[in-house]
Image (spheres, rainbow, N blue to C red):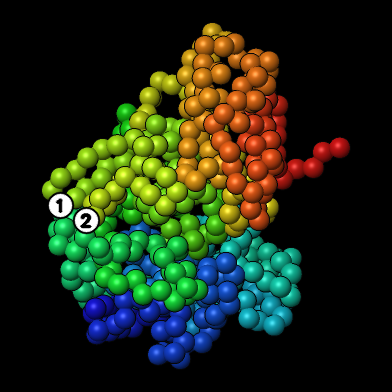
Amino acid sequence: MDIAFLLNGETVTLRDVDPTMTTLDWLRDSRGLTGTKEGCNEGDCGACTVMVTDAQGTRGLNACLLFLPQLNGKAVTTVEGLAGPDGNLHPVQEAMVTHHGSQCGFCTPGIVVSLAAGQIAGETDHEQQLAGNLCRCTGYAPIMKAAKAAAQKPVPKWLQDLPTGPARRGLSQAKLPASVDALAEFLLANPSARIVAGATDIGLWVNKDFRDLGEVVFVSQIEEMARVETAPYMIRIGAAATVEHLRLALQDHHPHFARMLARFASAQVRNAATIGGNIANGSPIGDTPPPLIALGASLLLRRGDFTREILLEDFFLDYGRQDIHPGEFVEAITVPRDPGAPDRLKVYKLSKRFDQDISAVLGAFNIAIEDGKVQSARIAFGGMAGIPKRATAIEAALVGKPWTRETVEAAMGAITEDFTPLSDLRASMGYRLVAGSNMLLRYWLEDEGMATSVTGVSA
């Protein structure tokens, strides 16, 4: 596979690259750019963060989960490229020195790149920006001081307009299709090919399990699949739209869903992970399927020129088994909208850590109330079964009943009719059942005006 991109402002053209070579390995082994560190090699520590710029903007990504073909046509900046051509330090670098933000220094390059990418993007929530950067020795107080100080400075001129040229267009080829039509044609001819989108899941297969992915095709060049479009009666989410893109797009429509997505992994992972990937991998603990199911979302599936639409809840058949055929792929997700109806969706994520952790239970509740009675209820859970699944018994216990605590408490008991969850390292079966049913009570309490916060402490 041949690719072209910009690296610290210079054009790089590579021939016959291994499609599953990570950017981290290539930077360190082939270019000698060892400022980008290898820590966990699974996207948790942020030591390998690099800055990537394309038509979607500038963002920090984990180089350990970024395959080289994903860079085609993009601009990559490593920590070595943050300083100006005359040697002037980037404002983040200056602030880290001034505020003593580094001790051993191993984590520092990734932290600096994350903050530099956040400065370009206008990010001001530094705790959220650094949730994916682990520092074990310095402590975050001086790092946060540095982040706040750097945020007051303008973006350096040498990074305001990254160079353009042939590399920004990339190289066109079958395994890097530039359109949905080209992807459909490739998969029709190669139905067993592995689709690579953000690689935040598949990257671990290579880094940790040393799997051979076989034939691969990348969707990183297909701009039409990366869009989130809002119309009066629907929201259309391209399957290659990132979690971060969806988070920003939902803030005005389903803000509680958007707030949950801020806890989805880290900024680096959200900037790469795609909605289609989070659905198509069929994980029972994926964070996006339950709220999408609660909203009545549908999938647009395509094989060649043929398309079909199914409800998202019907896509998941059993653990590890989805309703998708060889050569078929998820093109988009459609969420219905009623412009005149209030947003009733609440999404509760329960995990051992607040940030960057896998859900033990995730509950999504979309309950419509009219004249004091439950008119409709769509409730879905992750972590409670082998697939993301609706709680139909709970829904039936609510619909048509008065919206009272008595109704809610009676419906809570129906959770054992809907689910028999497993016990594992994250939670026991009993804990999951209690936690899941309590989420319904929390929904009702919040509807009654009670303020709740999982980050607050009260006596």
Which quarter of the picture shows residue 451?
Answer: top right
At a point 64% along the width and 31% down the height, the residue shown is 437
What is the crowding at mark 1: few (fewer than 14 residues within 10 Å), some, or many (at least 20)?
some
Rendered view: 134 above or below 406: below
Which quarter of the picture shows residue 71?
Answer: bottom left
- Where does residue 39 sit, x and y in percent of width and height? 58, 77
At a point 37% along the width and 29% down the height, the residue shown is 337
What is the crowding at mark 2: few (fewer than 14 residues within 10 Å), some, or many (at least 20)?
many
Q: Residue furthest right?
A: 459
Q: Which mark is residue 93?
A: none
| Label 2 secondary element | loop
Mark 2 → mark 1, Cα distance in angstroms? 8 Å
Amino acid marked by disc 1:
Gly
- Where does residue 124 sit, x and y in percent of width and height? 58, 55
Amino acid marked by disc 2:
Gly
Which quarter of the picture shows residue 216?
Answer: bottom left
- Where does residue 214 sit, x and y in percent of width and height? 30, 72
Task: Find disc 1 in the rendering and name its residue.
Answer: 304
User: Is residue 91 visible to the viewer in this orientation of the structure?
Assistant: no
Tell me, yes or no, whether the two marked residues, 2 and 1, touch with CB atoms within 8 Å: yes
Q: Which mark is residue 327?
A: 2
Q: Residue furthest top?
A: 371
- Where does residue 390 sit, x and y in percent of width and height? 48, 33
Rendered view: 346 above or below 421: above
Rendered view: 251 above or below 109: above
Rendered view: 366 above or below 376: below
Q: Is residue 143 left or right of residue 162?
A: right
